[in-house]
Structures are given as C-alpha cells and as structure tokens.
Image (cartoon, rainbow, N blue to C red):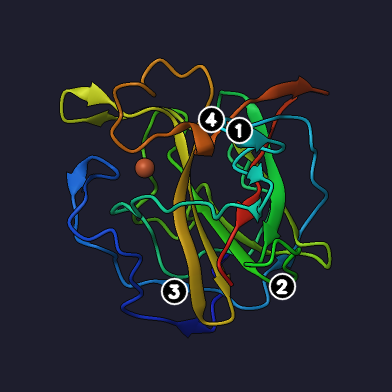
Amino acid sequence: MLTTRRRFLAGVSTGLGGLVVGCGTTQTADNPGGRGVGAASAGGSGGTTTGGGSGSTSATDSGLLLDSGGCIATNSDAQGPFYRLGTPVRSNLDLYGEQGDRLQLSGVVRDGSCQALANAVVEIWAADSDGVYDSDSDEQRYYGQVATDGDGRYSFTTISPGRYLNGSTFRPAHIHMKVWLGDTNLLITQIYFAGDPYLDVDPLAEPSRTIVLAQSSGLVQGVFDVNTNA
Ligand SMILES: [Fe+2]
C-alpha cells in the first residue's frame, strides 16, 4: 500500500465556488481536502525554464512573476473532481512504464514575504498519457506528495500528462497542485505547458501558470515556483 496519510482536513475553501470545467465537469468550491504529513524530502530544482509574464512584471521562474514590490502570489485554479485523499508520499510517479515524455517538475515554495518555505507539503496529481485519471485504484497513479526542503524546494519525476475532453473541447495538458503548511491549505492550482494548442480556448489556463519545458538528459524539465500568502 503506497498511501501514507495521518490526518484529514475537511472543508478547505479556496474561493473557487461554482467553477465549471476543472476536470471536465461542474463542481463546487472544493472537495474535502487532505494530505499526508511527513512527506518525502524534496529534490533539487532544475531552474531550466522560464514562465509567462505580462505588463510591467518580469518572469524569472515559471509561475513566478516579480515586480519591484517582490513576489506576486501564485493564483488558484479549480481543484477538479479527481483530487484524492491519502496522496502517496513519493517524488517519483513514473512507475508504470507508460509511453510519453519523462517529466521533472520542480520549484520553490515561498511564503508571503517571498522567503523560501521549508516543510511545506506539495501534492500533485495528473492524468496519465491517455488523459485518464486514476480515480479509484490503490496505486493512485500519478498522484504524489513531497515536503519542501530547507530551501523551500520540491521536485517530482512523472510523465507528461495527456489531454482529455471537457465537453466538446480538449483541456490543455496540466498538472494539479495543492500546497499545505501544517493543516493549512495555502493553494490549489493547475500548471500548464507552453505551446499547448488548447491553452487559448481553455477558460482556466493562463500565462502566469504556464511553464516552458526544456529537454535535458532524457527528461523534459519544467520549473514552477509557488508564491503563497503564508
Ligand atoms: Fe485535470
């Protein structure tokens, strides 16, 4: 049994009430949330990509927009219906020999003062290469959580997720993320990939959470830094 979780937290809200889409269905604000405590330690952050930005801000790492005032908080996105309690504590999700690019996703979690946040827990979940979520098996394929290290870093190895239909249109490929500090949920969001042809037609995708992937040593690598309000 891969699942490790000690506590459940119910009724976490992100202010995304009544959002449509998420993962192909209408949903209310949040499903009950939960997380594992004592997650695996994080690996290093690749730092190979840059994210989107606009206006007077500048992008340094994916998902991180900086201006003269410091970090701008990473914004939230729909949780969707496929979040599962008891996310396995593991940084390697590429365990099933599926076709597709092997993807390293890494970054830094920061607090509301733009300082690295150690011991935050980062959960991710995504569809497989065919665009299907593992919504019920004990394996919880492509679900995992790690704790940030002393420099606020997290890292996962997984595969590039597939797209799936949302109504009559594909959603762009994405990875869901949920960030915790203790029992407090800091953020629920989704990460997208530059160049995806469905970004422009998706109501949730936005440049600040769209990362550029770079090829490196048989991997594609992307960086998504998270600025929280903690
Ligand atoms: Fe999704």
- The mark found on residue 54 in the picture is 4
Pointer 1 residue Cβ closer than 8 Å to ligand 1: no
Q: Which residue is mark 2?
A: 119
Which quarter of the image is occupied by the C terminus? bottom right
- View quadrant of ligand 1: top left
The mark nearer the N terminus, 2 or 4, is: 4
Q: Residue at x 47, y 29 (%)?
A: 129
Q: Is residue 161 above or below residue 33?
A: above
The one of 212 and 135 positioned closer to us in this rendering: 212
Q: Residues within 10 Å of mark 2 (few under 14, many from 20)?
A: many
Q: Residue at x 83, y 49 (%)?
A: 44
Q: Which of labels 1 and 4 is toward the front?
A: 4
- The mark found on residue 97 in the picture is 1
Amino acid marked by disc 1: Gly
Amino acid marked by disc 2: Asn
Amino acid marked by disc 3: Gly
Q: Which of labels 2 and 3 is toward the front?
A: 2
**Contact, mark 3 vs mark 4 (Cβ under 8 Å):** no
Q: Which residue is mark 3?
A: 34
Q: Give the Cα distance between marks 3 and 4.
A: 34 Å
